[in-house]
Image: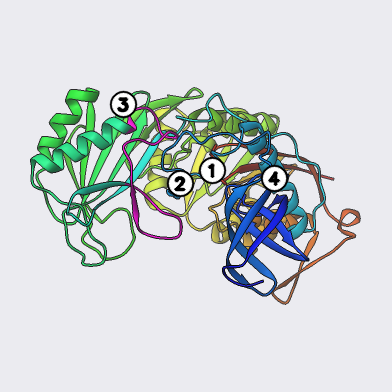
Amino acid sequence: MKKNDVIISEASGYGSECEAVFLHGDSPVFVPFCIRGERAEIKILSAKGGVAYGRCERVFSPSPARVDAPCPVFGKCGGCQLQHMRYEEQLALKADLVKNTLKKIGGIDADVLPVYSGKNSYRYRNKLVLPVGRDAAGGTKIGFFAPRSHRIVDISDCLIQSAWCADIIEIVKAYMRGNGLTGYDELSASGDIRRIAVRELDGKFIVVLVAAHAVDAAPLAGMLAERFGHVTLLLNINASRGNAVFGEEWRTVCGEGFFEAEDMGIRYRAGANTFLQVNDDVRSGLYARIAEEAAGAECAVDLYSGGGMLTALLARACGRAFGIEVVKEASICADELKELNGLGRSMQNICGKVEDELAALLRGTSGARRVIVCDPPRKGMERSAVEAVKRSGAEKIILVSCNPATLARDLGLLVGSLKDDGGVLKKDPDYASTSGYKINYILPFDMFPQTKHVETLVCLERK
Protein backbone atom coordinates (compact mmCIF):
# COMPACT_ATOMS: atom_id res chain seq x y z
CA MET A 1 0.00 0.00 0.00
CA LYS A 2 1.43 3.34 -1.08
CA LYS A 3 0.43 6.96 -1.65
CA ASN A 4 -2.37 7.45 -4.23
CA ASP A 5 -3.50 3.82 -4.05
CA VAL A 6 -7.29 3.40 -3.98
CA ILE A 7 -8.85 0.71 -1.79
CA ILE A 8 -12.37 -0.39 -0.94
CA SER A 9 -12.98 -1.48 2.64
CA GLU A 10 -15.39 -1.37 5.58
CA ALA A 11 -14.79 0.78 8.67
CA SER A 12 -14.40 -1.48 11.72
CA GLY A 13 -14.07 1.17 14.43
CA TYR A 14 -12.49 4.48 15.41
CA GLY A 15 -9.01 5.77 16.10
CA SER A 16 -7.74 8.05 18.85
CA GLU A 17 -8.61 11.15 16.81
CA CYS A 18 -12.17 9.90 16.17
CA GLU A 19 -11.37 9.03 12.58
CA ALA A 20 -12.76 5.77 11.16
CA VAL A 21 -10.40 2.79 10.89
CA PHE A 22 -10.47 0.69 7.72
CA LEU A 23 -8.40 -2.47 7.33
CA HIS A 24 -6.47 -3.28 4.16
CA GLY A 25 -5.08 -6.73 4.82
CA ASP A 26 -3.62 -6.38 8.30
CA SER A 27 -2.84 -2.66 7.90
CA PRO A 28 -5.06 0.02 9.47
CA VAL A 29 -6.07 3.00 7.35
CA PHE A 30 -7.27 6.07 9.28
CA VAL A 31 -9.89 8.14 7.46
CA PRO A 32 -11.77 11.18 8.83
CA PHE A 33 -15.50 11.86 8.30
CA CYS A 34 -16.50 8.21 8.02
CA ILE A 35 -18.57 6.04 10.38
CA ARG A 36 -18.00 2.47 11.55
CA GLY A 37 -19.85 -0.06 9.43
CA GLU A 38 -19.64 2.04 6.27
CA ARG A 39 -18.12 0.54 3.14
CA ALA A 40 -16.20 3.18 1.23
CA GLU A 41 -13.67 3.93 -1.46
CA ILE A 42 -10.51 5.35 0.12
CA LYS A 43 -7.59 7.14 -1.51
CA ILE A 44 -4.31 6.67 0.36
CA LEU A 45 -2.65 9.99 1.20
CA SER A 46 0.34 8.58 3.09
CA ALA A 47 1.60 5.18 4.20
CA LYS A 48 4.49 4.22 6.42
CA GLY A 49 5.35 1.29 8.64
CA GLY A 50 2.13 -0.63 7.93
CA VAL A 51 -0.09 2.33 8.87
CA ALA A 52 -1.84 4.53 6.32
CA TYR A 53 -3.96 7.69 6.25
CA GLY A 54 -6.56 8.27 3.61
CA ARG A 55 -9.40 10.37 2.24
CA CYS A 56 -12.90 9.09 1.59
CA GLU A 57 -13.76 9.37 -2.09
CA ARG A 58 -17.28 7.93 -1.83
CA VAL A 59 -19.42 5.91 0.56
CA PHE A 60 -21.15 2.82 -0.87
CA SER A 61 -23.26 1.97 2.19
CA PRO A 62 -23.94 5.01 4.40
CA SER A 63 -24.47 4.32 8.09
CA PRO A 64 -27.90 5.04 9.60
CA ALA A 65 -25.94 7.33 11.91
CA ARG A 66 -24.80 9.54 9.01
CA VAL A 67 -26.33 13.03 8.70
CA ASP A 68 -25.69 16.07 6.55
CA ALA A 69 -23.34 18.44 8.37
CA PRO A 70 -25.11 21.78 8.91
CA CYS A 71 -21.90 23.84 8.72
CA PRO A 72 -20.91 24.92 5.18
CA VAL A 73 -17.16 24.69 5.96
CA PHE A 74 -17.24 21.37 7.84
CA GLY A 75 -14.26 19.32 6.70
CA LYS A 76 -12.33 22.45 5.70
CA CYS A 77 -12.24 24.14 9.10
CA GLY A 78 -10.23 22.39 11.82
CA GLY A 79 -12.72 23.10 14.61
CA CYS A 80 -15.18 20.18 14.30
CA GLN A 81 -14.65 16.55 13.34
CA LEU A 82 -18.03 14.87 14.00
CA GLN A 83 -20.85 16.87 12.42
CA HIS A 84 -21.36 14.06 9.89
CA MET A 85 -22.76 11.69 12.52
CA ARG A 86 -25.83 11.68 14.73
CA TYR A 87 -25.21 12.91 18.24
CA GLU A 88 -26.00 9.50 19.77
CA GLU A 89 -23.18 7.98 17.71
CA GLN A 90 -20.83 10.74 18.86
CA LEU A 91 -21.56 9.88 22.49
CA ALA A 92 -21.06 6.16 21.91
CA LEU A 93 -17.80 6.87 20.06
CA LYS A 94 -16.45 8.96 22.96
CA ALA A 95 -17.32 6.33 25.56
CA ASP A 96 -15.48 3.72 23.48
CA LEU A 97 -12.56 6.12 22.98
CA VAL A 98 -12.10 6.50 26.74
CA LYS A 99 -12.46 2.75 27.40
CA ASN A 100 -10.07 1.71 24.62
CA THR A 101 -7.45 4.32 25.50
CA LEU A 102 -7.42 3.31 29.16
CA LYS A 103 -6.90 -0.32 28.12
CA LYS A 104 -4.32 0.30 25.40
CA ILE A 105 -2.13 2.83 27.22
CA GLY A 106 -2.91 2.26 30.89
CA GLY A 107 -3.55 -1.47 30.95
CA ILE A 108 -6.92 -0.80 32.61
CA ASP A 109 -9.90 -2.86 31.44
CA ALA A 110 -12.83 -1.12 33.15
CA ASP A 111 -16.43 -0.29 32.38
CA VAL A 112 -17.20 3.25 31.25
CA LEU A 113 -20.54 4.85 32.05
CA PRO A 114 -22.67 6.45 29.30
CA VAL A 115 -21.44 9.93 28.43
CA TYR A 116 -23.00 12.86 30.31
CA SER A 117 -24.31 15.39 27.79
CA GLY A 118 -25.73 18.87 28.16
CA LYS A 119 -28.85 20.52 26.74
CA ASN A 120 -27.18 21.72 23.53
CA SER A 121 -25.01 19.89 21.03
CA TYR A 122 -24.67 23.16 19.06
CA ARG A 123 -24.46 26.80 20.22
CA TYR A 124 -22.85 25.80 23.51
CA ARG A 125 -19.53 27.69 23.66
CA ASN A 126 -19.19 30.80 25.84
CA LYS A 127 -15.75 31.73 24.50
CA LEU A 128 -14.59 32.62 20.99
CA VAL A 129 -11.06 33.21 19.63
CA LEU A 130 -10.71 33.86 15.90
CA PRO A 131 -7.57 34.67 13.90
CA VAL A 132 -7.86 37.60 11.51
CA GLY A 133 -5.97 37.57 8.22
CA ARG A 134 -6.35 38.64 4.62
CA ASP A 135 -6.98 36.94 1.32
CA ALA A 136 -5.00 37.20 -1.92
CA ALA A 137 -6.93 40.33 -2.91
CA GLY A 138 -6.22 42.05 0.40
CA GLY A 139 -9.70 41.52 1.85
CA THR A 140 -10.27 40.57 5.48
CA LYS A 141 -10.59 36.90 6.46
CA ILE A 142 -11.92 35.91 9.88
CA GLY A 143 -12.29 32.26 10.75
CA PHE A 144 -10.58 29.17 12.11
CA PHE A 145 -7.42 27.50 10.91
CA ALA A 146 -7.68 24.57 8.53
CA PRO A 147 -6.50 21.25 10.02
CA ARG A 148 -2.75 21.12 10.72
CA SER A 149 -2.14 24.56 9.19
CA HIS A 150 -2.34 28.28 9.81
CA ARG A 151 -4.45 28.87 6.72
CA ILE A 152 -7.59 30.73 7.78
CA VAL A 153 -10.93 29.34 6.59
CA ASP A 154 -13.17 32.39 6.23
CA ILE A 155 -16.52 32.09 8.04
CA SER A 156 -19.56 34.24 8.72
CA ASP A 157 -20.74 32.17 11.72
CA CYS A 158 -19.80 29.13 13.82
CA LEU A 159 -22.55 26.76 14.88
CA ILE A 160 -20.88 25.51 18.07
CA GLN A 161 -20.42 29.09 19.26
CA SER A 162 -23.23 31.09 20.82
CA ALA A 163 -25.60 32.88 18.45
CA TRP A 164 -23.74 36.19 18.86
CA CYS A 165 -20.76 34.82 16.89
CA ALA A 166 -22.12 35.98 13.50
CA ASP A 167 -22.70 39.50 14.85
CA ILE A 168 -19.15 39.72 16.21
CA ILE A 169 -17.63 38.73 12.87
CA GLU A 170 -19.83 41.18 10.94
CA ILE A 171 -19.06 44.05 13.33
CA VAL A 172 -15.28 43.47 13.30
CA LYS A 173 -15.18 43.32 9.49
CA ALA A 174 -17.23 46.52 9.26
CA TYR A 175 -14.95 48.25 11.78
CA MET A 176 -11.84 47.24 9.82
CA ARG A 177 -13.32 48.39 6.50
CA GLY A 178 -14.39 51.72 7.95
CA ASN A 179 -11.02 52.41 9.53
CA GLY A 180 -8.67 51.20 6.80
CA LEU A 181 -7.31 48.29 8.83
CA THR A 182 -6.01 45.04 7.37
CA GLY A 183 -5.76 41.50 8.67
CA TYR A 184 -2.40 40.18 9.79
CA ASP A 185 -0.14 38.14 7.51
CA GLU A 186 2.06 35.73 9.49
CA LEU A 187 4.60 35.16 6.73
CA SER A 188 5.45 38.82 6.19
CA ALA A 189 4.58 39.89 9.77
CA SER A 190 2.56 42.75 8.31
CA GLY A 191 -0.95 44.04 8.87
CA ASP A 192 -2.96 45.48 11.74
CA ILE A 193 -5.44 43.08 13.38
CA ARG A 194 -4.36 39.60 14.48
CA ARG A 195 -7.30 38.18 16.45
CA ILE A 196 -10.64 38.84 18.03
CA ALA A 197 -11.48 37.13 21.33
CA VAL A 198 -14.85 37.19 23.11
CA ARG A 199 -16.14 35.80 26.40
CA GLU A 200 -19.79 35.91 27.47
CA LEU A 201 -20.81 35.84 31.14
CA ASP A 202 -24.52 35.93 31.93
CA GLY A 203 -25.22 37.98 28.80
CA LYS A 204 -22.30 40.37 29.42
CA PHE A 205 -19.38 40.51 27.00
CA ILE A 206 -15.62 40.92 27.31
CA VAL A 207 -14.12 41.54 23.88
CA VAL A 208 -10.41 41.66 23.08
CA LEU A 209 -9.05 43.17 19.87
CA VAL A 210 -5.53 41.81 19.35
CA ALA A 211 -3.49 44.13 17.14
CA ALA A 212 0.09 44.07 15.90
CA HIS A 213 0.44 47.71 17.00
CA ALA A 214 -1.63 50.39 18.66
CA VAL A 215 -4.85 51.18 16.77
CA ASP A 216 -7.88 53.36 17.49
CA ALA A 217 -10.41 50.88 18.89
CA ALA A 218 -12.93 53.47 20.05
CA PRO A 219 -15.10 53.10 16.90
CA LEU A 220 -15.30 49.36 17.56
CA ALA A 221 -16.39 50.02 21.14
CA GLY A 222 -19.28 52.10 19.86
CA MET A 223 -20.36 49.48 17.34
CA LEU A 224 -20.28 46.71 19.98
CA ALA A 225 -22.21 48.80 22.50
CA GLU A 226 -24.90 49.53 19.91
CA ARG A 227 -25.40 45.80 19.31
CA PHE A 228 -24.77 44.26 22.75
CA GLY A 229 -25.26 47.05 25.28
CA HIS A 230 -22.75 47.07 28.13
CA VAL A 231 -19.45 45.68 26.82
CA THR A 232 -15.87 45.67 28.07
CA LEU A 233 -13.44 46.17 25.18
CA LEU A 234 -9.73 45.57 25.66
CA LEU A 235 -6.96 46.30 23.18
CA ASN A 236 -4.07 43.85 23.33
CA ILE A 237 -0.82 44.67 21.54
CA ASN A 238 0.96 41.58 20.22
CA ALA A 239 3.97 42.52 18.10
CA SER A 240 5.69 39.14 18.41
CA ARG A 241 6.20 36.76 15.52
CA GLY A 242 5.20 33.75 17.60
CA ASN A 243 1.86 31.95 17.91
CA ALA A 244 0.84 33.31 21.31
CA VAL A 245 -2.74 34.58 21.26
CA PHE A 246 -2.04 37.63 23.43
CA GLY A 247 0.89 39.99 23.88
CA GLU A 248 1.93 41.50 27.20
CA GLU A 249 0.50 45.01 26.69
CA TRP A 250 -3.18 45.53 27.58
CA ARG A 251 -5.28 48.69 27.28
CA THR A 252 -8.86 49.14 28.44
CA VAL A 253 -10.88 50.88 25.71
CA CYS A 254 -14.19 50.82 27.57
CA GLY A 255 -15.76 49.01 30.49
CA GLU A 256 -14.24 47.61 33.68
CA GLY A 257 -11.94 44.98 32.16
CA PHE A 258 -13.76 42.17 33.98
CA PHE A 259 -17.26 41.10 34.99
CA GLU A 260 -18.74 39.53 38.07
CA ALA A 261 -20.95 36.49 37.61
CA GLU A 262 -22.41 33.64 39.65
CA ASP A 263 -22.45 29.90 39.03
CA MET A 264 -23.73 27.19 41.35
CA GLY A 265 -24.02 29.73 44.14
CA ILE A 266 -20.39 30.90 43.80
CA ARG A 267 -19.72 34.51 42.84
CA TYR A 268 -16.61 35.12 40.77
CA ARG A 269 -14.83 37.67 38.63
CA ALA A 270 -13.61 36.80 35.17
CA GLY A 271 -11.53 38.64 32.61
CA ALA A 272 -10.24 37.88 29.16
CA ASN A 273 -7.56 35.47 30.41
CA THR A 274 -9.49 33.74 33.21
CA PHE A 275 -9.86 30.00 32.62
CA LEU A 276 -13.44 28.80 32.57
CA GLN A 277 -14.84 25.69 30.91
CA VAL A 278 -16.40 26.72 27.59
CA ASN A 279 -19.65 24.77 28.10
CA ASP A 280 -21.61 26.26 31.03
CA ASP A 281 -24.21 23.49 31.20
CA VAL A 282 -21.79 20.55 31.17
CA ARG A 283 -19.35 22.35 33.47
CA SER A 284 -22.10 22.68 36.09
CA GLY A 285 -22.87 18.97 35.80
CA LEU A 286 -19.20 18.05 36.18
CA TYR A 287 -18.59 20.32 39.17
CA ALA A 288 -21.81 19.19 40.88
CA ARG A 289 -20.70 15.55 40.59
CA ILE A 290 -17.26 16.37 42.04
CA ALA A 291 -18.78 18.30 44.95
CA GLU A 292 -21.18 15.42 45.62
CA GLU A 293 -18.30 12.94 45.76
CA ALA A 294 -16.32 15.22 48.09
CA ALA A 295 -19.16 15.72 50.58
CA GLY A 296 -18.39 14.05 53.90
CA ALA A 297 -14.61 14.48 53.73
CA GLU A 298 -12.99 16.73 56.33
CA CYS A 299 -10.88 18.54 53.76
CA ALA A 300 -10.35 18.66 50.01
CA VAL A 301 -7.15 19.28 48.07
CA ASP A 302 -7.72 20.79 44.61
CA LEU A 303 -4.69 20.37 42.32
CA TYR A 304 -4.27 22.64 39.27
CA SER A 305 -7.03 24.77 40.78
CA GLY A 306 -7.06 27.69 38.33
CA GLY A 307 -9.27 30.60 39.34
CA GLY A 308 -10.69 28.78 42.36
CA MET A 309 -14.28 28.02 41.32
CA LEU A 310 -14.01 24.30 42.07
CA THR A 311 -11.95 24.94 45.23
CA ALA A 312 -14.78 27.14 46.53
CA LEU A 313 -17.37 24.46 45.81
CA LEU A 314 -15.19 21.91 47.60
CA ALA A 315 -14.83 24.26 50.59
CA ARG A 316 -18.61 24.40 50.88
CA ALA A 317 -18.94 20.62 50.47
CA CYS A 318 -16.20 19.71 52.97
CA GLY A 319 -15.83 22.78 55.16
CA ARG A 320 -12.13 23.12 54.28
CA ALA A 321 -10.35 23.16 50.92
CA PHE A 322 -6.88 23.91 49.58
CA GLY A 323 -6.09 24.86 45.99
CA ILE A 324 -2.68 24.69 44.31
CA GLU A 325 -2.15 26.69 41.11
CA VAL A 326 1.10 27.71 39.40
CA VAL A 327 -0.24 30.68 37.39
CA LYS A 328 0.05 33.76 39.58
CA GLU A 329 -2.82 35.67 37.95
CA ALA A 330 -5.16 32.69 38.42
CA SER A 331 -4.14 32.32 42.06
CA ILE A 332 -4.86 36.02 42.64
CA CYS A 333 -8.31 35.51 41.09
CA ALA A 334 -8.85 32.58 43.45
CA ASP A 335 -8.03 34.78 46.44
CA GLU A 336 -10.50 37.39 45.20
CA LEU A 337 -13.13 34.69 44.78
CA LYS A 338 -12.49 33.49 48.32
CA GLU A 339 -13.14 36.98 49.74
CA LEU A 340 -16.10 37.58 47.44
CA ASN A 341 -17.82 34.48 48.86
CA GLY A 342 -16.80 34.86 52.49
CA LEU A 343 -14.67 31.71 52.46
CA GLY A 344 -11.66 33.20 54.25
CA ARG A 345 -11.66 30.53 56.95
CA SER A 346 -12.41 27.49 54.82
CA MET A 347 -10.50 28.09 51.57
CA GLN A 348 -6.74 28.50 51.13
CA ASN A 349 -4.97 29.10 47.82
CA ILE A 350 -1.31 28.21 47.29
CA CYS A 351 0.59 29.64 44.33
CA GLY A 352 3.22 27.18 43.12
CA LYS A 353 3.86 23.99 41.18
CA VAL A 354 1.79 21.04 42.32
CA GLU A 355 4.87 18.79 42.40
CA ASP A 356 6.66 21.31 44.69
CA GLU A 357 3.79 22.12 47.07
CA LEU A 358 1.76 18.94 47.38
CA ALA A 359 3.92 16.88 49.75
CA ALA A 360 4.08 19.62 52.40
CA LEU A 361 0.34 20.25 52.12
CA LEU A 362 -0.41 16.57 52.59
CA ARG A 363 1.80 16.44 55.69
CA GLY A 364 -0.04 19.44 57.08
CA THR A 365 -3.43 17.78 56.64
CA SER A 366 -2.49 14.26 57.74
CA GLY A 367 -5.03 12.56 59.94
CA ALA A 368 -8.00 14.22 58.24
CA ARG A 369 -10.39 12.36 55.94
CA ARG A 370 -9.29 13.84 52.64
CA VAL A 371 -10.41 13.91 49.05
CA ILE A 372 -7.96 14.92 46.35
CA VAL A 373 -9.17 16.41 43.06
CA CYS A 374 -6.72 16.51 40.13
CA ASP A 375 -7.67 18.48 37.01
CA PRO A 376 -4.34 18.96 35.20
CA PRO A 377 -3.65 20.50 31.78
CA ARG A 378 -3.62 18.28 28.68
CA LYS A 379 -0.07 17.10 29.35
CA GLY A 380 -1.25 15.46 32.57
CA MET A 381 0.42 15.29 35.97
CA GLU A 382 4.10 15.35 36.79
CA ARG A 383 5.35 11.92 37.86
CA SER A 384 6.30 13.20 41.33
CA ALA A 385 2.78 14.59 41.81
CA VAL A 386 1.24 11.24 40.85
CA GLU A 387 3.44 9.48 43.40
CA ALA A 388 2.55 11.99 46.15
CA VAL A 389 -1.17 11.52 45.47
CA LYS A 390 -0.71 7.73 45.43
CA ARG A 391 0.96 7.81 48.87
CA SER A 392 -1.47 10.36 50.33
CA GLY A 393 -3.87 7.94 51.96
CA ALA A 394 -6.79 10.07 50.77
CA GLU A 395 -10.22 8.48 51.11
CA LYS A 396 -11.02 9.41 47.51
CA ILE A 397 -9.06 10.58 44.49
CA ILE A 398 -11.02 12.28 41.71
CA LEU A 399 -9.28 12.68 38.35
CA VAL A 400 -10.57 15.03 35.66
CA SER A 401 -8.93 15.10 32.24
CA CYS A 402 -9.54 16.44 28.74
CA ASN A 403 -6.93 14.04 27.29
CA PRO A 404 -7.70 10.29 27.44
CA ALA A 405 -4.07 9.39 26.69
CA THR A 406 -2.50 11.25 29.62
CA LEU A 407 -5.43 10.22 31.82
CA ALA A 408 -4.63 6.56 31.02
CA ARG A 409 -0.99 7.09 31.98
CA ASP A 410 -1.70 8.94 35.24
CA LEU A 411 -4.50 6.58 36.27
CA GLY A 412 -2.35 3.56 35.45
CA LEU A 413 0.40 4.84 37.72
CA LEU A 414 -2.08 5.58 40.52
CA VAL A 415 -3.71 2.14 40.57
CA GLY A 416 -0.51 0.26 39.70
CA SER A 417 -1.43 -1.12 36.28
CA LEU A 418 1.63 0.80 35.05
CA LYS A 419 5.04 0.52 36.70
CA ASP A 420 7.92 2.95 36.20
CA ASP A 421 10.95 0.84 35.31
CA GLY A 422 13.82 3.33 35.01
CA GLY A 423 11.68 5.83 33.13
CA VAL A 424 10.00 3.16 30.98
CA LEU A 425 6.35 2.41 31.76
CA LYS A 426 5.50 -1.29 31.84
CA LYS A 427 2.08 -2.89 32.34
CA ASP A 428 1.36 -5.03 35.39
CA PRO A 429 -1.60 -7.38 34.70
CA ASP A 430 -1.81 -8.34 38.40
CA TYR A 431 -2.13 -4.79 39.71
CA ALA A 432 -5.61 -5.27 41.21
CA SER A 433 -4.25 -7.41 44.04
CA THR A 434 -1.64 -4.88 45.13
CA SER A 435 -3.25 -1.51 44.36
CA GLY A 436 -4.20 0.71 47.28
CA TYR A 437 -7.10 2.21 45.30
CA LYS A 438 -9.97 0.82 43.29
CA ILE A 439 -11.81 2.53 40.47
CA ASN A 440 -15.34 3.31 41.60
CA TYR A 441 -16.54 4.57 38.21
CA ILE A 442 -15.44 6.30 34.99
CA LEU A 443 -17.80 8.95 33.61
CA PRO A 444 -17.08 10.91 30.39
CA PHE A 445 -18.60 14.38 29.96
CA ASP A 446 -19.27 15.78 26.49
CA MET A 447 -17.86 19.23 27.10
CA PHE A 448 -17.13 19.66 23.38
CA PRO A 449 -19.93 18.27 21.13
CA GLN A 450 -19.21 17.92 17.40
CA THR A 451 -15.46 17.68 18.13
CA LYS A 452 -13.06 14.83 18.90
CA HIS A 453 -12.47 16.07 22.45
CA VAL A 454 -13.95 14.55 25.61
CA GLU A 455 -13.68 15.36 29.33
CA THR A 456 -13.51 12.40 31.71
CA LEU A 457 -14.06 12.03 35.45
CA VAL A 458 -12.64 9.04 37.30
CA CYS A 459 -13.54 8.43 40.95
CA LEU A 460 -11.18 6.21 42.97
CA GLU A 461 -11.71 4.96 46.53
CA ARG A 462 -9.09 3.76 48.99
CA LYS A 463 -9.31 0.04 49.61
Q: Mark 4 touching mark 2, by CB under 8 A?
A: no
Q: Distance of mark 1 from mark 3, alpha carbons? A: 26 Å
Q: Distance of mark 2 from mark 3, alpha carbons? A: 25 Å
Q: Position of residue 226 (x, y in %)?
A: 17, 24
Q: Residues within 10 Å of mark 3 (few under 14, many from 20)?
A: some
Tally the marks: 4
Q: Disc 2 marks which residue?
A: 79
Comes first in the chain, label 4 or label 2: 4
Comes first in the chain, label 2 or label 3: 2
**Residue type for callout 1:** Thr
Q: Residues within 10 Å of mark 4 (few under 14, many from 20)?
A: many
Comes first in the chain, label 2 or label 1: 2
Q: Is residue 444 magenta?
A: no
Q: Disc 1 marks which residue?
A: 451
Q: Mark 2 touching mark 1, by CB under 8 A?
A: yes
Residue at 56%, 58% in the rendered image: 379
Of residues 315 and 196, the one drawn nearer to the viewer in this rendering: 196
Secondary structure at numbered mark 1? loop
Q: Mark 4 touching mark 3, by CB under 8 A?
A: no
Of residues 308 and 95, the one drawn nearer to the viewer in this rendering: 95
Q: Is residue 22 above or below residue 74?
A: below
Residue at 23%, 34% in the rendered image: 170
**Residue 176 is at least partly visible in this image:** yes
Secondary structure at numbered mark 2? loop
Q: Distance of mark 4 from mark 2, alpha carbons? A: 24 Å
Q: Is residue 154 magenta?
A: yes
**Residue type for callout 2:** Gly
**Residue type for callout 4:** Glu
Instruction: Give the dominant element type of the magenta stretch: helix, strand or loop.
Output: loop
Comes first in the chain, label 4 or label 3: 4
